[in-house]
Amino acid sequence: MENLTLFIAAAETLLESAASEMLAHRDEVYPNEAVGVLCDDGSCYPLINQARSAHQLEVSAFLVSEAIAMLVERGKSPVAFYHSHPTSSSGPSARDVEMMQTKPQALFVIIGQDGIAGWMWDDGLESVGAISLPDRERNVEPN
């Protein structure tokens, strides 16, 4: 339990440092879901949502593997996957939970209308940090 507490504190710091980059990506692809890889230094590597949808996310495993290999080659440490929910909260959907169950103890970050939240599956769904978005950020129509 102590390790989870430390992980939560680190996750919240990571979410805060990466927030502006993730929000910029979300705004760039709006109204579709944004998706990408988050590194331990707070940098983000956007991926392409091949579903091109506001309610569905699809990224080939090949592209994810290539992105992670390229980031590691550049000295980056990928630590999470992020995606946005353009029309809902930062809580995981049923499909998100299914994905988390296939990658236990991996960090998943969801950018919702209410904020940015980190989630993982560890013998059940665990919240591992969240930050609220100022009203001006979540009520402004993205570009």
Image (tube, rainbow, N blue to C red):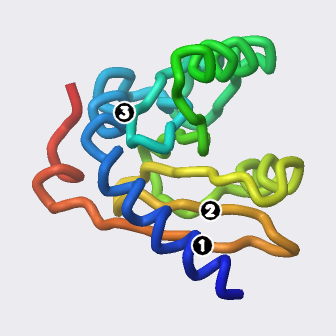
Element carrying mark 1 = strand
Disc 3 and disc 1: Cα gap in Å?
21 Å
- Measured as percent of width and height from the top left, residue 141 is found at 19, 37
Residue at the (30%, 39%) spot, across then down = 23
Quadrant location of residue 3?
bottom right
Residue at the (58%, 70%) spot, across then down = 7
- Labelled disc at residue 50: none
- Measured as percent of width and height from the top left, residue 54 is found at 51, 32
What is the crowding at mark 3: few (fewer than 14 residues within 10 Å), some, or many (at least 20)?
Answer: many
Quadrant location of residue 15?
bottom left
Work out whether residue 63 or residue 51 is closer to the camera in this orientation and state it: 63
- Measured as percent of width and height from the top left, residue 50 is found at 64, 15
What is the crowding at mark 2: few (fewer than 14 residues within 10 Å), some, or many (at least 20)?
Answer: many
Element carrying mark 2 = strand
Can you tell which of label 2 and label 3 is closer to the viewer?
2
Q: Farthest residue to the bottom: give it.
A: 1
Which residue is labeled 3 in the image? 26
Residue at the (17%, 61%) spot, across then down = 134
Can you tell which of label 3 and label 1 is closer to the viewer?
1
Which residue is labeled 1 in the image? 127
The amino acid pointed to by label 3 is Arg
Circle count: 3
The amino acid pointed to by label 1 is Ser
Residue at the (83%, 57%) spot, across then down = 104
Q: Earlier in the sequence, mark 2 or mark 3?
A: 3
Q: Are marks 2 and 1 in contact (CB under 8 Å)?
A: yes
Q: Earlier in the sequence, mark 2 or mark 1?
A: 2
Which residue is labeled 2 in the image? 119
Element carrying mark 3 = helix
In the picture, measured across the screen, residue 124 lies left or right of residue 128, that is right
The amino acid pointed to by label 2 is Trp
